[in-house]
Structures are given as structure tokens and as C-alpha cells.
Image (tube, rainbow, N blue to C red):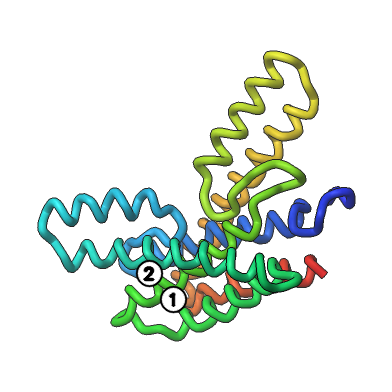
């Protein structure tokens, strides 16, 4: 299924595991960590703005910290990229360690847990930006949806099979993200806070595939 002509980090199986993990993380923080989005910072910014206009500073802080953590995570991934070999594997190792720690953090420190998940998510989305040569995101869907529909329209207009393949890939990863979210929903009901460790397992498999 994977195309050996592409770098390991762009092949479909690692991409699939990362996307499942991304969906699981978002569900985890929303359902178990105070209805905050770990990955979809647009939602956090909307709710942050609403809280600020309402003068609800405590609620505003709940959404501000993940946004700041996400920005720091992008910076951290860039630091690793320019300084270290095999930096994408190192990003995943750090992400695994951070998410493993999150599973131990009590509800009284939900803001810290959300910030760590957002930080690790940002490192992942910065480190893994292509799928078989096509730009994509493993932790959110809006860009993938836009690109998938664009490719589908191009195929319907031109009959170009490459565009059809591109559309299938994008819709496939959107489906995987939704599946990861559903797995996360079931996991938090069964495991509560340690449910995030399932994301660690998916990321560990990705590390093995990047060798």
C-alpha cells in the first residue's frame, strides 16, 4: 500500500497512524479535559475571543494556554529540524513522552494537560506535512477537506487519474481522523485520563516505521 518512492515520513501507513492519533487527542481533551480542542486552535481562538468580550478571564485562560502552547510546539519542532538528524523521529519520541505524562495529570491541572497536548500536537503537525508528496495535516481536517474537494473537482473536470488518487487519499485521512476520534470517545469512557496512552501506542508504531 505504501509507495517506496516517497520518504518514510510521507508514506501512507505512518500517515494513517499519525492521523488516528490526532483524532484521538482532540476527542480526549474535549471530552475529558474541559472541552478544549487540543489540535483545532481555530475553535480555541473563537472561544477565547468570546470569553474576553464577556469578561470571563478564567474561561479565557482555558483557551489561551493551548494556543500559546501550540505556537511554542511549532517553534520547538523547527529547532529540532535545523539542529538534529532524524528530527522527525525525535519529534515523535518527545510527543510520546509528553502524552504519557499527560495520562498522570489530574483534572485539577487540566489546563496544564491541554497545553502539553497542544504543544505535542504542534510538533507533530509541523514535522509531518506531506502525504505521498501532497501537503496534508495529521491533526486537523479543514485543509485536507479543502484539498480533497479541490482534487475531486479537478478530476471531474479533466479526468486526470492523479487528481482522483489525490482526492481518495485526502478523504481517506479524513475518515481516519474521524475513526481516531471515535476510538478516543470509547477509550475515555473505559480508561478515563490514561486513554491518551493509546495515542502513545500509535505514535510508537509510527516511530518504528520511520527507521
For label 1, the SS is: loop
Which mark identifies residue 32? 2
Residue at the spot 53% in from the left edge and 45% down from the top edge = 141
On the picture, is 27 further left or further right than 153? left
Query: How many numbered discs sit on the rendered protein?
Result: 2
Q: Quadrant of residue 30?
A: bottom left
Residue 46 pos. (x, y %)? 29, 48
Q: Earlier in the sequence, mark 1 or mark 2?
A: 2
For label 2, the SS is: helix
Whether 40 is drawn above or below 88: the answer is above
Residue 102 pos. (x, y %)? 46, 79
* Mark 2 crowd level (few <14, some 14–19, many ≥20, 10 Å Cα): some
Instruction: Identify residue for label 1.
Output: 192
- Does the CB distance between marks 1 and 2 fall below 8 Å? yes
The furthest residue to the left: 55
Residue 152 pos. (x, y %)? 65, 25
The furthest residue to the right: 4
Residue 211 pos. (x, y %)? 82, 70
The reply to whether residue 31 is in sight is no
Residue at the spot 20% in from the left edge and 64% down from the top edge = 59
On the picture, is 209 further left or further right than 34? right
Q: Quadrant of residue 166?
A: top right
Q: Quadrant of residue 206?
A: bottom right
Whether 107 is drawn above or below 119: the answer is below
Whether 8 is drawn above or below 120: the answer is above
* Mark 1 crowd level (few <14, some 14–19, many ≥20, 10 Å Cα): some
Whether 96 is drawn above or below 133: the answer is below
Foreground mark, 1 or 2, reads 2
Distance Cα–Cα, label 1 vs label 2: 7 Å
The reply to whether residue 88 is in sight is yes
Q: Nearer the viewer, residue 93 or 178?
A: 93
Amino acid at each position: 500500500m505504501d509507495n517506496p518512492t516517497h520518504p518514510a515520513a510521507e508514506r501512507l501507513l505512518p500517515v494513517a497512524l499519525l492521523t488516528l492519533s490526532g483524532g484521538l487527542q482532540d476527542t480526549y481533551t474535549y471530552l475529558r479535559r474541559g472541552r478544549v480542542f487540543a489540535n483545532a486552535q481555530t475553535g480555541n481562538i473563537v472561544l477565547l475571543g468570546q470569553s474576553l468580550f464577556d469578561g470571563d478571564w478564567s474561561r479565557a485562560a482555558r483557551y489561551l494556554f493551548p494556543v500559546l502552547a501550540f505556537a511554542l510546539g511549532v517553534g520547538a519542532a523547527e529547532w529540532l529540524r535545523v539542529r538534529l538528524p532524524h528530527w522527525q523521529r525525535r519529534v515523535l519520541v518527545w510527543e510520546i513522552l509528553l502524552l504519557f505524562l499527560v495520562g498522570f495529570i489530574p483534572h485539577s491541572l487540566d489546563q496544564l494537560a491541554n497545553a502539553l497536548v497542544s504543544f505535542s500536537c504542534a510538533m507533530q503537525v509541523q514535522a509531518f506535512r506531506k502525504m505521498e508528496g501532497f501537503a496534508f495535516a495529521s491533526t486537523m481536517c479543514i485543509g485536507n477537506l479543502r484539498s480533497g474537494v479541490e482534487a475531486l473537482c479537478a478530476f471531474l473536470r479533466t479526468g486526470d487519474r492523479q487528481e482522483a488518487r489525490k482526492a481518495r487519499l485526502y478523504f481517506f485521512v479524513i475518515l481516519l481522523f474521524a475513526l481516531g476520534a471515535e476510538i478516543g470517545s470509547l477509550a475515555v469512557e473505559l480508561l478515563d485520563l490514561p486513554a491518551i496512552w493509546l495515542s502513545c501506542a500509535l505514535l510508537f508504531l509510527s516511530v518504528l516505521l520511520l527507521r
